[in-house]
Image (cartoon, rainbow, N blue to C red):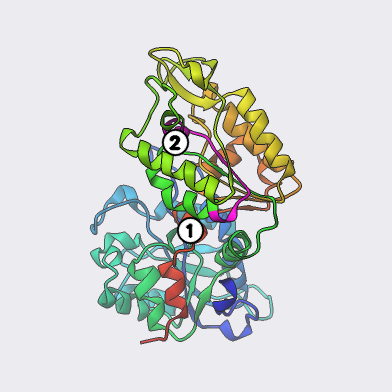
Amino acid sequence: TVEALELGPLDEGEWLRNKRVFLRVDFNVPLDEDGQITDDTRIRAVLPTIQFLIEAGAKLIIGSHLGRPGGKRVESLSLEPAGSRLAELSGYEVLLPEESIGDAPKKLVHDLRVASKTGSQHGTPQLCLLENLRFYPGETADDEEFARALGDLFDVYLNDAFGAVHRKHASVHALPKTKRDRGVGMLVRRELESLGRLVASPTSPYLAIIGGAKVSDKLDVIEALFQRCDVVCIGGAMANTFLAAKGHDMQKSLVEEDKLALARTLIEKAQQQSAELVLPSDVMVAESLDAADGMVVPVSAVPQGTTALDIGPATIERFSQHIAKAQTIFWNGPMGLFESEPFATGTFAVARAMSAAPGFTVVGGGDSAAAVRQAGEEIASRFDHISTGGGASLRFIEGRQLPGIEALRQNTH
Protein backbone atom coordinates (compact mmCIF):
# COMPACT_ATOMS: atom_id res chain seq x y z
CA THR A 1 0.00 0.00 0.00
CA VAL A 2 1.02 3.60 -0.44
CA GLU A 3 0.91 4.23 3.30
CA ALA A 4 3.65 1.65 3.91
CA LEU A 5 6.13 3.68 1.86
CA GLU A 6 7.95 6.65 3.33
CA LEU A 7 7.09 9.08 0.58
CA GLY A 8 10.24 11.04 1.04
CA PRO A 9 11.79 14.42 1.58
CA LEU A 10 9.70 16.69 -0.65
CA ASP A 11 7.46 18.03 2.12
CA GLU A 12 10.01 20.58 3.29
CA GLY A 13 12.82 21.67 1.04
CA GLU A 14 15.16 23.76 3.17
CA TRP A 15 17.36 20.82 4.24
CA LEU A 16 18.08 20.11 0.56
CA ARG A 17 20.10 23.33 0.06
CA ASN A 18 23.48 22.50 -1.50
CA LYS A 19 22.73 18.77 -1.13
CA ARG A 20 23.57 16.68 -4.20
CA VAL A 21 20.24 15.14 -5.22
CA PHE A 22 19.87 12.39 -7.83
CA LEU A 23 16.46 12.28 -9.51
CA ARG A 24 15.69 9.18 -11.57
CA VAL A 25 13.29 10.24 -14.33
CA ASP A 26 11.78 8.57 -17.38
CA PHE A 27 12.96 10.54 -20.41
CA ASN A 28 12.41 7.53 -22.69
CA VAL A 29 10.70 9.83 -25.18
CA PRO A 30 9.78 9.04 -28.81
CA LEU A 31 12.16 10.44 -31.43
CA ASP A 32 11.65 10.89 -35.18
CA GLU A 33 14.18 9.95 -37.87
CA ASP A 34 15.98 13.26 -37.35
CA GLY A 35 16.32 12.66 -33.60
CA GLN A 36 13.66 15.25 -32.74
CA ILE A 37 11.29 14.59 -29.82
CA THR A 38 7.73 13.94 -31.04
CA ASP A 39 6.07 13.85 -27.60
CA ASP A 40 7.56 15.58 -24.54
CA THR A 41 4.85 14.44 -22.06
CA ARG A 42 7.34 12.51 -19.92
CA ILE A 43 9.60 15.54 -19.59
CA ARG A 44 6.71 17.86 -18.69
CA ALA A 45 5.46 15.33 -16.12
CA VAL A 46 8.52 15.74 -13.86
CA LEU A 47 8.88 19.53 -14.15
CA PRO A 48 7.13 20.18 -10.79
CA THR A 49 9.65 17.96 -8.96
CA ILE A 50 12.60 19.49 -10.82
CA GLN A 51 11.39 23.03 -10.10
CA PHE A 52 10.89 22.22 -6.40
CA LEU A 53 14.41 20.79 -6.06
CA ILE A 54 16.07 23.66 -7.92
CA GLU A 55 14.18 26.28 -5.89
CA ALA A 56 15.16 24.43 -2.69
CA GLY A 57 18.78 25.08 -3.67
CA ALA A 58 19.72 21.47 -4.44
CA LYS A 59 22.52 20.46 -6.76
CA LEU A 60 20.37 18.38 -9.09
CA ILE A 61 21.59 15.35 -11.04
CA ILE A 62 19.05 13.72 -13.37
CA GLY A 63 19.38 10.18 -14.69
CA SER A 64 17.32 8.33 -17.30
CA HIS A 65 17.42 5.65 -19.97
CA LEU A 66 16.41 5.99 -23.62
CA GLY A 67 15.72 3.05 -25.92
CA ARG A 68 17.76 -0.15 -25.91
CA PRO A 69 21.39 0.67 -26.73
CA GLY A 70 22.56 -2.70 -25.38
CA GLY A 71 25.15 -1.44 -22.90
CA LYS A 72 27.17 0.61 -25.39
CA ARG A 73 27.16 4.20 -26.60
CA VAL A 74 24.72 4.76 -29.47
CA GLU A 75 24.74 8.40 -30.59
CA SER A 76 21.16 8.30 -31.90
CA LEU A 77 20.03 7.39 -28.35
CA SER A 78 21.83 10.24 -26.62
CA LEU A 79 19.78 12.22 -24.09
CA GLU A 80 20.96 15.47 -25.69
CA PRO A 81 17.54 16.19 -27.32
CA ALA A 82 15.85 15.57 -23.95
CA GLY A 83 18.32 17.94 -22.29
CA SER A 84 17.60 20.67 -24.85
CA ARG A 85 13.84 20.28 -24.41
CA LEU A 86 14.20 20.29 -20.60
CA ALA A 87 16.20 23.53 -20.75
CA GLU A 88 13.54 25.03 -23.03
CA LEU A 89 10.64 24.00 -20.75
CA SER A 90 12.27 24.74 -17.38
CA GLY A 91 14.36 27.82 -18.08
CA TYR A 92 17.33 26.18 -16.30
CA GLU A 93 20.74 25.52 -17.79
CA VAL A 94 21.13 21.78 -18.47
CA LEU A 95 24.68 20.37 -18.55
CA LEU A 96 25.25 16.96 -20.16
CA PRO A 97 28.62 15.34 -19.37
CA GLU A 98 29.90 12.72 -21.81
CA GLU A 99 30.35 10.17 -19.01
CA SER A 100 27.82 9.33 -16.30
CA ILE A 101 30.31 8.02 -13.73
CA GLY A 102 33.81 9.05 -12.68
CA ASP A 103 35.68 12.28 -11.97
CA ALA A 104 34.29 14.41 -14.84
CA PRO A 105 30.61 14.32 -13.78
CA LYS A 106 31.67 14.52 -10.11
CA LYS A 107 33.50 17.83 -10.76
CA LEU A 108 30.64 19.13 -12.87
CA VAL A 109 28.16 18.39 -10.06
CA HIS A 110 30.46 20.03 -7.49
CA ASP A 111 30.55 23.23 -9.57
CA LEU A 112 26.79 23.42 -10.33
CA ARG A 113 25.29 26.89 -9.87
CA VAL A 114 22.34 26.62 -7.48
CA ALA A 115 19.34 28.91 -7.04
CA SER A 116 19.99 31.82 -4.69
CA LYS A 117 18.40 31.62 -1.25
CA THR A 118 17.44 35.29 -1.34
CA GLY A 119 15.94 35.08 -4.80
CA SER A 120 18.54 37.50 -6.21
CA GLN A 121 19.99 36.25 -9.45
CA HIS A 122 23.61 35.12 -9.68
CA GLY A 123 22.95 33.54 -13.06
CA THR A 124 20.55 30.87 -14.27
CA PRO A 125 20.45 27.79 -11.99
CA GLN A 126 22.15 24.74 -13.48
CA LEU A 127 21.40 21.04 -13.35
CA CYS A 128 23.28 17.99 -14.58
CA LEU A 129 21.60 15.48 -16.91
CA LEU A 130 23.64 12.28 -17.06
CA GLU A 131 24.01 10.56 -20.41
CA ASN A 132 21.76 7.55 -21.20
CA LEU A 133 22.28 5.13 -18.30
CA ARG A 134 21.76 2.15 -20.61
CA PHE A 135 25.03 3.06 -22.36
CA TYR A 136 26.50 1.10 -19.42
CA PRO A 137 25.90 -2.68 -19.25
CA GLY A 138 25.68 -2.42 -15.46
CA GLU A 139 22.36 -0.56 -15.69
CA THR A 140 20.15 -3.35 -17.06
CA ALA A 141 22.20 -5.95 -15.12
CA ASP A 142 21.24 -4.23 -11.81
CA ASP A 143 24.97 -4.22 -11.10
CA GLU A 144 25.89 -3.05 -7.59
CA GLU A 145 29.34 -1.83 -8.62
CA PHE A 146 27.80 0.43 -11.27
CA ALA A 147 25.25 1.58 -8.68
CA ARG A 148 28.03 2.51 -6.24
CA ALA A 149 29.84 4.46 -8.98
CA LEU A 150 26.65 6.44 -9.66
CA GLY A 151 26.12 6.84 -5.90
CA ASP A 152 29.49 8.63 -5.59
CA LEU A 153 27.89 11.60 -7.36
CA PHE A 154 25.16 12.40 -4.82
CA ASP A 155 23.77 12.34 -1.27
CA VAL A 156 19.98 12.02 -1.73
CA TYR A 157 18.08 9.61 -4.04
CA LEU A 158 14.62 10.35 -5.44
CA ASN A 159 12.66 8.25 -7.94
CA ASP A 160 10.23 10.07 -10.22
CA ALA A 161 10.34 7.50 -13.05
CA PHE A 162 7.10 5.58 -12.60
CA GLY A 163 7.49 4.10 -16.10
CA ALA A 164 10.63 2.27 -14.88
CA VAL A 165 9.78 1.21 -11.30
CA HIS A 166 8.73 -2.29 -12.43
CA ARG A 167 12.28 -3.01 -13.68
CA LYS A 168 15.18 -4.38 -11.63
CA HIS A 169 17.74 -2.01 -13.13
CA ALA A 170 20.65 -0.48 -11.25
CA SER A 171 19.46 3.14 -11.14
CA VAL A 172 15.98 1.99 -10.02
CA HIS A 173 16.72 -0.99 -7.76
CA ALA A 174 20.36 -1.34 -6.61
CA LEU A 175 21.12 2.40 -6.34
CA PRO A 176 18.49 3.61 -3.82
CA LYS A 177 19.50 0.87 -1.39
CA THR A 178 22.92 2.53 -1.07
CA LYS A 179 21.48 5.78 0.35
CA ARG A 180 19.92 6.58 3.71
CA ASP A 181 18.08 9.65 2.39
CA ARG A 182 15.72 8.49 -0.35
CA GLY A 183 12.14 8.77 -1.48
CA VAL A 184 9.87 9.45 -4.42
CA GLY A 185 9.21 12.56 -6.47
CA MET A 186 5.86 14.26 -6.95
CA LEU A 187 4.98 12.27 -10.07
CA VAL A 188 5.54 8.84 -8.49
CA ARG A 189 3.71 9.95 -5.36
CA ARG A 190 0.70 10.95 -7.48
CA GLU A 191 0.84 7.64 -9.40
CA LEU A 192 0.89 5.57 -6.20
CA GLU A 193 -1.95 7.52 -4.64
CA SER A 194 -4.20 7.42 -7.74
CA LEU A 195 -3.55 3.78 -8.64
CA GLY A 196 -3.71 2.90 -4.95
CA ARG A 197 -7.37 3.97 -4.92
CA LEU A 198 -8.10 1.33 -7.58
CA VAL A 199 -6.50 -1.42 -5.50
CA ALA A 200 -7.32 -0.48 -1.92
CA SER A 201 -10.61 1.41 -1.98
CA PRO A 202 -12.47 1.47 -5.32
CA THR A 203 -16.00 2.86 -5.10
CA SER A 204 -18.60 0.57 -6.67
CA PRO A 205 -19.68 0.17 -9.42
CA TYR A 206 -16.08 -0.43 -10.51
CA LEU A 207 -15.62 -0.71 -14.29
CA ALA A 208 -12.50 -1.81 -16.15
CA ILE A 209 -12.06 -1.36 -19.91
CA ILE A 210 -9.26 -3.49 -21.32
CA GLY A 211 -8.00 -3.40 -24.90
CA GLY A 212 -4.86 -3.99 -26.88
CA ALA A 213 -3.63 -6.80 -29.06
CA LYS A 214 -3.20 -9.95 -27.00
CA VAL A 215 -4.93 -11.69 -24.10
CA SER A 216 -1.58 -13.20 -23.11
CA ASP A 217 -0.12 -9.70 -22.51
CA LYS A 218 -2.81 -8.84 -19.95
CA LEU A 219 -3.85 -12.19 -18.53
CA ASP A 220 -2.78 -11.38 -14.95
CA VAL A 221 -4.45 -7.98 -14.87
CA ILE A 222 -7.71 -9.37 -16.31
CA GLU A 223 -7.81 -12.06 -13.60
CA ALA A 224 -7.07 -9.48 -10.90
CA LEU A 225 -9.81 -7.17 -12.20
CA PHE A 226 -12.40 -9.96 -12.23
CA GLN A 227 -11.89 -10.20 -8.46
CA ARG A 228 -12.45 -6.47 -7.87
CA CYS A 229 -14.66 -5.14 -10.67
CA ASP A 230 -18.41 -5.16 -11.16
CA VAL A 231 -18.04 -4.91 -14.95
CA VAL A 232 -15.12 -5.65 -17.32
CA CYS A 233 -15.43 -4.46 -20.95
CA ILE A 234 -12.98 -5.98 -23.44
CA GLY A 235 -12.22 -4.44 -26.83
CA GLY A 236 -9.32 -4.22 -29.23
CA ALA A 237 -7.81 -7.20 -30.99
CA MET A 238 -7.78 -9.21 -27.74
CA ALA A 239 -11.60 -9.29 -27.89
CA ASN A 240 -11.30 -11.40 -31.07
CA THR A 241 -9.82 -14.27 -29.07
CA PHE A 242 -12.72 -14.15 -26.58
CA LEU A 243 -15.25 -13.97 -29.43
CA ALA A 244 -13.59 -16.91 -31.22
CA ALA A 245 -13.67 -18.85 -27.93
CA LYS A 246 -17.44 -18.29 -27.90
CA GLY A 247 -17.72 -19.81 -31.38
CA HIS A 248 -17.65 -16.75 -33.66
CA ASP A 249 -15.68 -17.01 -36.91
CA MET A 250 -13.46 -13.93 -36.82
CA GLN A 251 -12.04 -14.63 -40.31
CA LYS A 252 -8.63 -12.90 -40.81
CA SER A 253 -8.78 -11.05 -37.47
CA LEU A 254 -5.91 -11.44 -35.03
CA VAL A 255 -6.87 -14.42 -32.84
CA GLU A 256 -4.52 -16.19 -30.42
CA GLU A 257 -5.47 -19.73 -31.41
CA ASP A 258 -3.37 -21.21 -28.60
CA LYS A 259 -5.23 -19.08 -26.02
CA LEU A 260 -8.82 -20.09 -26.90
CA ALA A 261 -9.07 -22.54 -23.99
CA LEU A 262 -7.64 -19.87 -21.69
CA ALA A 263 -10.24 -17.36 -22.93
CA ARG A 264 -13.02 -19.85 -22.16
CA THR A 265 -11.58 -20.29 -18.66
CA LEU A 266 -11.55 -16.51 -18.17
CA ILE A 267 -15.18 -16.28 -19.28
CA GLU A 268 -16.04 -18.91 -16.65
CA LYS A 269 -13.98 -17.09 -13.99
CA ALA A 270 -15.86 -13.87 -14.65
CA GLN A 271 -19.11 -15.69 -13.95
CA GLN A 272 -17.68 -17.26 -10.76
CA GLN A 273 -16.47 -13.88 -9.51
CA SER A 274 -19.84 -12.25 -10.32
CA ALA A 275 -18.12 -9.79 -12.66
CA GLU A 276 -20.09 -8.91 -15.79
CA LEU A 277 -17.89 -9.53 -18.84
CA VAL A 278 -18.92 -7.33 -21.78
CA LEU A 279 -17.60 -8.29 -25.23
CA PRO A 280 -18.21 -6.48 -28.54
CA SER A 281 -21.51 -7.20 -30.30
CA ASP A 282 -20.40 -5.48 -33.51
CA VAL A 283 -17.04 -4.59 -35.07
CA MET A 284 -15.60 -2.43 -37.82
CA VAL A 285 -13.91 -4.65 -40.42
CA ALA A 286 -11.72 -4.07 -43.47
CA GLU A 287 -9.71 -6.19 -45.89
CA SER A 288 -6.36 -4.68 -44.84
CA LEU A 289 -4.77 -2.58 -42.10
CA ASP A 290 -4.22 0.34 -44.47
CA ALA A 291 -7.80 0.43 -45.77
CA ALA A 292 -9.28 3.93 -46.25
CA ASP A 293 -12.52 2.93 -44.54
CA GLY A 294 -14.28 0.00 -42.91
CA MET A 295 -17.67 -1.67 -42.62
CA VAL A 296 -19.71 -2.32 -39.47
CA VAL A 297 -20.90 -5.91 -39.03
CA PRO A 298 -22.26 -8.04 -36.16
CA VAL A 299 -19.63 -10.30 -34.56
CA SER A 300 -21.72 -13.26 -35.74
CA ALA A 301 -21.32 -12.27 -39.41
CA VAL A 302 -17.74 -11.17 -40.08
CA PRO A 303 -17.33 -11.33 -43.89
CA GLN A 304 -14.82 -13.71 -45.40
CA GLY A 305 -11.37 -12.19 -45.94
CA THR A 306 -11.86 -9.28 -43.51
CA THR A 307 -10.21 -8.25 -40.23
CA ALA A 308 -11.84 -6.65 -37.20
CA LEU A 309 -10.02 -3.33 -36.59
CA ASP A 310 -12.33 -1.44 -34.20
CA ILE A 311 -15.43 -1.88 -32.06
CA GLY A 312 -18.74 -0.95 -33.69
CA PRO A 313 -21.36 1.69 -32.73
CA ALA A 314 -23.61 -0.70 -30.77
CA THR A 315 -20.61 -1.79 -28.68
CA ILE A 316 -19.55 1.85 -28.19
CA GLU A 317 -23.06 2.63 -26.94
CA ARG A 318 -23.02 -0.29 -24.49
CA PHE A 319 -19.53 0.54 -23.18
CA SER A 320 -20.57 4.21 -22.82
CA GLN A 321 -23.64 3.28 -20.77
CA HIS A 322 -21.46 1.35 -18.33
CA ILE A 323 -19.00 4.28 -18.18
CA ALA A 324 -21.79 6.73 -17.33
CA LYS A 325 -22.97 4.58 -14.40
CA ALA A 326 -19.57 3.66 -12.93
CA GLN A 327 -18.05 5.32 -9.86
CA THR A 328 -14.53 3.98 -10.51
CA ILE A 329 -13.17 3.43 -14.05
CA PHE A 330 -9.81 1.99 -15.12
CA TRP A 331 -8.88 1.87 -18.80
CA ASN A 332 -5.87 0.20 -20.37
CA GLY A 333 -5.45 -0.57 -24.07
CA PRO A 334 -7.02 0.88 -27.25
CA MET A 335 -10.28 -0.41 -28.73
CA GLY A 336 -8.82 -0.78 -32.21
CA LEU A 337 -6.18 0.36 -34.66
CA PHE A 338 -6.49 3.96 -33.39
CA GLU A 339 -3.29 5.08 -35.16
CA SER A 340 -5.32 4.82 -38.40
CA GLU A 341 -8.14 7.39 -38.60
CA PRO A 342 -10.86 5.05 -39.98
CA PHE A 343 -10.39 2.75 -36.96
CA ALA A 344 -9.94 5.31 -34.17
CA THR A 345 -13.66 5.86 -33.54
CA GLY A 346 -14.05 3.31 -30.73
CA THR A 347 -10.96 4.39 -28.82
CA PHE A 348 -11.80 8.10 -29.04
CA ALA A 349 -15.43 7.41 -28.10
CA VAL A 350 -14.29 5.66 -24.90
CA ALA A 351 -12.00 8.63 -24.17
CA ARG A 352 -14.88 11.10 -24.63
CA ALA A 353 -17.28 9.02 -22.53
CA MET A 354 -14.74 8.72 -19.71
CA SER A 355 -13.96 12.44 -19.80
CA ALA A 356 -17.65 13.15 -19.20
CA ALA A 357 -18.10 10.43 -16.56
CA PRO A 358 -18.91 11.40 -12.96
CA GLY A 359 -16.74 8.59 -11.54
CA PHE A 360 -13.02 8.50 -10.66
CA THR A 361 -11.25 7.94 -14.01
CA VAL A 362 -7.78 6.46 -14.49
CA VAL A 363 -5.97 5.58 -17.73
CA GLY A 364 -3.22 3.01 -17.27
CA GLY A 365 -0.46 4.45 -19.45
CA GLY A 366 0.87 3.06 -22.73
CA ASP A 367 -1.15 3.30 -25.94
CA SER A 368 -4.36 4.24 -24.15
CA ALA A 369 -2.66 7.26 -22.56
CA ALA A 370 -1.34 8.26 -25.99
CA ALA A 371 -4.83 7.84 -27.43
CA VAL A 372 -6.38 10.10 -24.76
CA ARG A 373 -3.91 12.85 -25.57
CA GLN A 374 -4.50 12.33 -29.28
CA ALA A 375 -8.24 12.78 -28.63
CA GLY A 376 -7.46 16.32 -27.50
CA GLU A 377 -6.19 18.30 -24.52
CA GLU A 378 -9.71 19.29 -23.51
CA ILE A 379 -10.64 15.60 -23.14
CA ALA A 380 -7.35 14.60 -21.48
CA SER A 381 -7.64 17.38 -18.89
CA ARG A 382 -10.92 15.93 -17.56
CA PHE A 383 -9.40 12.60 -16.51
CA ASP A 384 -8.57 12.22 -12.84
CA HIS A 385 -5.31 10.46 -13.62
CA ILE A 386 -3.38 9.50 -16.76
CA SER A 387 -0.56 7.16 -15.77
CA THR A 388 2.92 7.61 -17.21
CA GLY A 389 3.79 3.92 -16.89
CA GLY A 390 1.98 1.23 -18.88
CA GLY A 391 3.80 -1.86 -17.59
CA ALA A 392 4.24 -0.44 -14.10
CA SER A 393 0.58 0.54 -13.74
CA LEU A 394 -0.58 -2.92 -14.86
CA ARG A 395 1.75 -4.64 -12.41
CA PHE A 396 0.49 -2.38 -9.62
CA ILE A 397 -3.15 -3.18 -10.47
CA GLU A 398 -2.28 -6.89 -10.48
CA GLY A 399 -1.12 -6.48 -6.87
CA ARG A 400 2.49 -7.35 -7.67
CA GLN A 401 5.53 -5.69 -6.13
CA LEU A 402 7.37 -2.94 -8.00
CA PRO A 403 11.15 -3.40 -7.53
CA GLY A 404 11.83 0.36 -7.68
CA ILE A 405 9.35 1.00 -4.86
CA GLU A 406 10.42 -1.99 -2.75
CA ALA A 407 14.04 -0.76 -2.94
CA LEU A 408 12.97 2.47 -1.21
CA ARG A 409 11.45 0.49 1.65
CA GLN A 410 14.43 -1.79 2.37
CA ASN A 411 17.26 -1.16 4.80
CA THR A 412 20.33 0.50 3.35
CA HIS A 413 23.52 -1.48 2.77
Label 2 packing within 10 angstroms: few (<14), some (14-19), many (20+): many
Does 319 sit left or right of 359 as displayed?
left
Question: Residue 188 is drawn in which quadrant?
Answer: bottom right
- Residue drawn 63% across and 29% down? 316
Task: Specify the segment rendered in magenta.
Answer: 227-242
In this figure, which residue is indicated by the disc labeled 1?
Answer: 398
Distance Cα–Cα, label 1 vs label 2: 18 Å
- Whether residue 232 appears in magenta in the rendering, the answer is yes
Label 1: element kind: helix
Query: Percent position (x, y) of residue 65?
Result: 37, 58
Of marks 1 and 2, which one's residue comes earlier in the chain? 2
Identify which amino acid the numbered label 2 is placed on.
Met
Q: Please, is residue 255 above or below residue 130 in the view?
A: above
> In this view of the protein, which residue sits in the foreground, 258 or 65?
258
Label 2: element kind: helix
> In this view of the protein, which residue sits in the foreground, 399 or 32?
399
Label 1 packing within 10 angstroms: few (<14), some (14-19), many (20+): some
Q: Please, is residue 155 above or below residue 67 in the view?
A: below
> In this view of the protein, which residue sits in the foreground, 284 or 59?
284
Report if residue 40 is visible in the image. no
In this figure, which residue is indicated by the disc labeled 2?
Answer: 238
Q: Please, is residue 63 above or below residue 32 in the view?
A: below
- Residue drawn 32% across and 75% down? 147
How many badges with numbers are in the image?
Answer: 2
Q: List the single residue furthest toward the right.
A: 358
Query: Percent position (x, y) of residue 185?
Result: 55, 69
- Residue drawn 40% across and 74% down? 108
